[in-house]
């Protein structure tokens, strides 16, 4: 388990110019603070890009990936269930900001 602490974010509501997709989609860029003892720690900083969907089925994370903030290198890592739940709750609370 990585110790996940979300320290900030930017969010943008995505526009579907053709009207093909139902509901609303939001792109989050989360700033993460990772403990130095954690294998994910990087002195270049760690971020997460999250595609968050709100539609008739409810709210959900459609896709995410972790990356080094300084280099934008994508990291091939997945969140554990409790970490994904924390990210889901954070995004759901911040879709209107």
Image: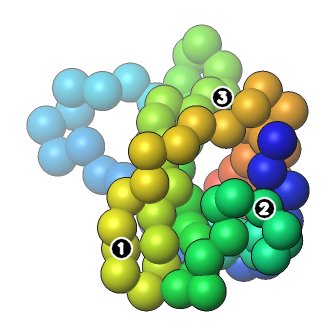
Residue 87, relative to residue 74: is it above or below? above
Specify whether 80 is left or right of 28: right
Q: Do the residues under discs 1 and 3 have CB atoms within 8 angstroms?
A: no
Disc 3 secondary structure class? strand
Q: Residues within 10 Å of mark 1 (few under 14, many from 20)?
A: few
Which mark is drawn over residue 59?
3
Q: Give the alpha-carbon distance from disc 2 to disc 3, as whole Å.
A: 30 Å
**Disc 2 marks which residue?**
38
Q: Nearer the viewer, residue 36 or 80?
A: 36
**Nearest-to-viewer mark from 1 and 3:** 1
Q: Nearer the viewer, residue 18 or 68?
A: 68
Q: Residue at x 48, y 79 (%)?
A: 69
Mark 2 or mark 3: whose residue is earlier in sequence: 2
Q: Residue at x 78, y 27 (%)?
A: 81
Q: Residue at x 74, y 47 (%)?
A: 87
**Disc 1 marks which residue?**
72
Q: Do the residues under discs 2 and 1 have CB atoms within 8 angstroms?
A: no
**Nearest-to-viewer mark from 2 and 3:** 2
Where does the C terminus fall, quadrant-wise?
Answer: bottom right
């Amino acid at each position: 388990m990585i110790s996940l602490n979300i320290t900030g974010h930017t969010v943008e509501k995505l526009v579907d110019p053709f009207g093909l997709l139902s509901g609303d989609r939001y792109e989050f860029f989360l700033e993460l603070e990772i403990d130095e003892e954690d294998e994910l720690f990087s002195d270049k900083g760690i971020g997460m890009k999250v595609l968050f969907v709100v539609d008739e089925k409810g709210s959900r994370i459609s896709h995410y990936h972790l990356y080094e903030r300084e280099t934008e290198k994508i990291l091939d890592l997945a969140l554990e269930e409790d970490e994904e739940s924390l990210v889901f709750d954070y995004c759901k609370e911040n879709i209107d900001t």
